[in-house]
Image: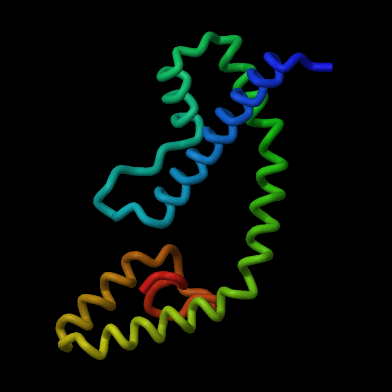
Amino acid sequence: MISSATRGKLLVFVVFVVGGLTGALIDNVYETRWRTDGESARRSPQQLNQQLYDLLELSTEQRQQFQTILEASRPDFEKLFAENRKLLEPNRRKAAELQEQTRAKIRAILTEEQAKKYNEYNEKRRPGPPGPSRQSPGRPGQP
C-alpha cells in the first residue's frame, strides 16, 4: 500500500506532466492554426522540452525520467485524440454549413470592398487546401 504522502507526491507529479502535455498540445494548436504569417516559425517538441528543462533546471537524470514519462503517456494521449476526432467528425459538415451561413449574413452588411477584404482575411486563416469537409471561405467553426 502506498502512503498518503507518496500518493500526494505522485498526484502532484501526474498533474504536472498532464499540464505540460496539455500546454504542448495548446501550443501546437496555436502554432498550426492561429498563428499569423508574420509571426516566428513553429518550435519543435524538442525545443519546447529544452525550454522547460532549462526553466526547471532539471538534472540529466531528471530530463531522462521526464522524457520517459512523456513517451509512456504518448500512446494514451494519441488514443484519446483519435477518439475525440471520431466524435467530432459527424459535426464537421454541420459546422461548415453554419459557418457559411454566418459568413453570408456578415457579407450582407458589408460593402463590396469590405466583403473582398473579409474573404481574403478568412482565406489566410484557413490551414491547408480546401477539402471535402471545408467550404470556402475559411474553416468550420470560424466566422
Return the x and y of residue 25 as percentages of the image width and height. Answer: 51, 44
Q: Residue at x 72, y 17 (%)?
A: 4
Q: Quadrant of residue 10?
A: top right
Q: Residue at x 47, y 46 (%)?
A: 26
> Which quarter of the rendering shows the N terminus?
top right
In this view, which residue lies farthest toward the bottom? Answer: 108
* Front-most of residues 104 and 124: 104
In this view, which residue lies farthest toward the front? Answer: 4
Return the x and y of residue 132 as percentages of the image width and height. Answer: 55, 78
**How many labels, in total?**
0
Up-down: is 58 above or below 26? above
Up-down: is 27 above or below 81? above
Q: Residue at x 64, y 61 (%)?
A: 85
Q: Residue at x 76, y 14 (%)?
A: 3
> Which quarter of the rendering shows the C terminus?
bottom left
Give the color scheme: rainbow, by chain, secondary structure or one colour.
rainbow
Up-down: is 89 above or below 25? below
Q: Is residue 69 left or right of residue 109?
A: right
Up-down: is 48 above or below 133? above
In this view, which residue lies farthest toward the right? Answer: 1
Q: Is residue 30 left or right of residue 117?
A: right
Q: Is residue 94 left or right of residue 80?
A: left
Return the x and y of residue 103 as percentages of the image width and height. Answer: 34, 82
Return the x and y of residue 140 as percentages of the image width and height. Answer: 46, 72
